[in-house]
Amino acid sequence: MVDVFNSLWKIRVVQELQRWSEAVLNAPSAFFNGIPPCPYAKQAWANSRVQVAFGGESAVMDAVRAWDDSRDVIIVIAEDWPHDQIEDWCKTANSEIAEFDLTLMAFVPGQGPDTGQPEEEMENWTPLVDEEYAMVFIQSL
């Protein structure tokens, strides 16, 4: 049986990521001298080079093993993975996956990474999901 609530939550998380990307990552930033914080995000979404997955450590490692350069980034939304373990796990895993020319970057609520960008530039969007969630970004070096 399909867990409709969980399926709807996943759809809303993906929609929220797209909104956040448009409103924060693609928006010109005074902090970055008028350049968007991530000038590549818009094109990555437009060209379907962003993949979103859900899971824990095994989902991240599955994505690492399956990496084929058809994506610019794979975002794994943490499920059943204690937030306080994700950052350290990514640091350890980065040393193990360096041979694949990939890197992991954790985004954990309340932990960063801290770019120095002013909060008001990062709050110009409306969240769709009430619960906070952590993410692991997988990208090529």
Image: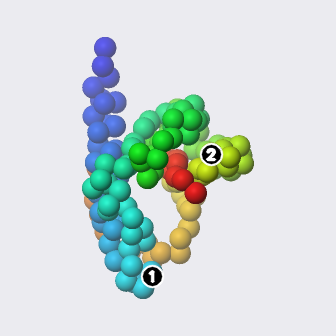
Q: Quadrant of residue 43?
A: bottom left
- Assign a secondary structure to mark 1: loop
- 31, 49: nearer the viewer: 49
Q: Could you tell me which quadrant the N terminus lies in?
A: top left
Residue bearing the label numbered 1: 31
- Residue count near mark 2 (Cα–Cα under 10 Å), binned few <14, some 14–19, many ≥20: few
Residue bearing the label numbered 2: 100
Query: Which three-letter amino acid code belongs to the residue tagged 1?
Result: Phe
- 26, 135: nearer the viewer: 26
Q: CA distance from mark 2 to mark 1?
A: 33 Å
Q: Residue at x 36, y 50 (%)?
A: 49
Residue 80 can be seen in this image? yes
Q: Position of residue 33 (x, y in %)?
A: 42, 85
Q: Which disc is residue 112 wearing?
A: none
Q: Residue at x 32, y 22 (%)?
A: 3
Query: Which three-letter amino acid code belongs to the residue tagged 2?
Result: Phe
Q: Residue at x 54, y 53 (%)?
A: 140
Q: Residue at x 30, y 53 (%)?
A: 47
Compare marks 2 and 1 and give the one earlier in the sequence: 1
Q: Could you tell me which quadrant the C terminus lies in?
A: bottom right
- 20, 37: nearer the viewer: 37
Residue 132 can be seen in this image? no
Q: Position of residue 29 (x, y in %)?
A: 38, 78
- Assign a secondary structure to mark 2: helix
Is 39 situated left or right of 99 in this image?
left
> Is 113 placed above or below 3 here?
below
